[in-house]
Image (tube, helix red, strand yellow):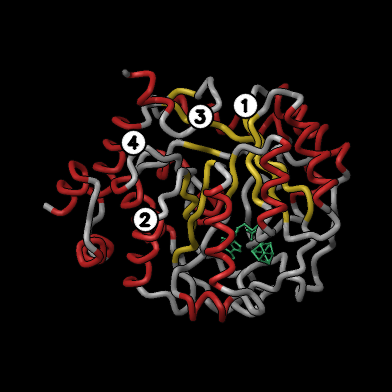
Amino acid sequence: MIIEKALSMHNLTKAEIITILKLDDAAPLFVAADEARARYVGPDVHLRGLIEFSNYCHNNCLYCGLRCGNSKVKRYRMLPVDIIAAARRAKELDYKTVVLQSGEDPFYTVDTMVEIISGIKALGLAITLSIGEKTYAEYQAYKAAGADRYLLRIETTDKALYEKLDPGMSFENRLRCLNDIKALGFETGSGMMVGLPGQSIESMADDILFLKKLPVDMAGIGPFIANPDTPLAQYNKNNFELALRVMAITRLLLPDINIPATTAMETLSPEGRIKALQSGANVVMPNVTQTVYRELYQLYPGKVGIGQTADTSKSIVEEKIKTIGRTIGKGKGFRGEYLEKLK
Ligand code: SAH
Ligand code: SF4
């Protein structure tokens, strides 16, 4: 009943979301989310080439392998010319968007970022940034240089938990950043980790409603994976199915947004990305980072695709997408494109 309501109305109360998150069998939820995905964003899977350009970070998030307190990581940063070369490689592989992701690395000043963004823009690619908390003026400069989208996960909407897991950071500032990003006209992405220590089912329901309220144009939802080199090492449990539920409900409530099948899902479950694509997701972000850097960019352990090259990452993903009867998106895959075409 609740699932049918969600599929037709795209609205649920917090209590209803909690009920679905606690169902014994979530199969009908996944079927409904797949149905909403088919109706609102169609069969296309949009590929975004991911460039992990620096693993330096001045923050110390307890869950993350790149945290500044982790002395085991060998740090690297790519120069603008190499980042632009990676984007060129992505273009050769026929990607229409690149996602630039890094730790919060002060090496990349506004001028440096503008240089990178302009260089990539000149290739005709859409650009998504995932580089953390900045000032309004910085976001504005990135937008003016041509960045199209910005991804900043809220991580959890439980303020007390957020501030415990992200020492020195404030929940209010995270919200301020998201509001600035939206106000500047970026396609705005947010999302969360599912299964953080101390995160309740109730707060996961709040997380979903938060995405709906903003609203986001993209939602990146992935299971929390304990990293042995972090203070959360001992919280080792498989949150794949729960993350899939959160993602599927998000699809039902925000039927026309872009939802990636996250790498973290693939890491925790064989064919996890394919399962996600069949439960509401419509985006995949294959890695185009040079193989030498991939193993150094470990937010969590066991990340898939570490030994692969950009070519093999792409062909593996494309092959799988075709076997489940889906197509590869030929456009830039902005929110609402599919519905526009249907008109
Ligand atoms: N520094 C930027 C982008 C890189 S981190 C930022 O923080 O926004 C990208 C995402 O990785 C984070 O938003 C977080 O949700 C996710 N992440 C970090 N550590 C993780 C872990 N142990 N398990 C699963 N996801 C993790
Ligand atoms: Fe840095 Fe992002 Fe990792 Fe936090 S989650 S430590 S901001 S890379």
Q: Residue at x 71, y 34 (%)?
A: 310
Contact, CB < 8 Å: mark 2 with mark 4?
no
Counting residues from the start of the chain, the first of labels 2 and 3 encountered is: 2
Could you tell me the amino acid type at mark 3? Gly
- Residue 38 visible in the snapshot: yes
Which residue matches tag 1? Answer: 96
Question: x and y percent of residue 297 in the render?
Answer: 73, 55
State how far apart marks 1 and 3 are (Cα).
8 Å
Q: Is residue 25 left or right of residue 261?
A: left
Which residue matches tag 2? Answer: 213
Contact, CB < 8 Å: mark 1 with mark 3?
yes
Which residue matches tag 4? Answer: 37
State how far apart marks 2 and 1 are (Cα).
29 Å
Could you tell me the amino acid type at mark 2? Lys
Which residue matches tag 3? Answer: 333
**Front residue (pair 327, 251):** 251
Q: Residue at x 67, y 50 (%)?
A: 139
Contact, CB < 8 Å: mark 4 with mark 3?
no
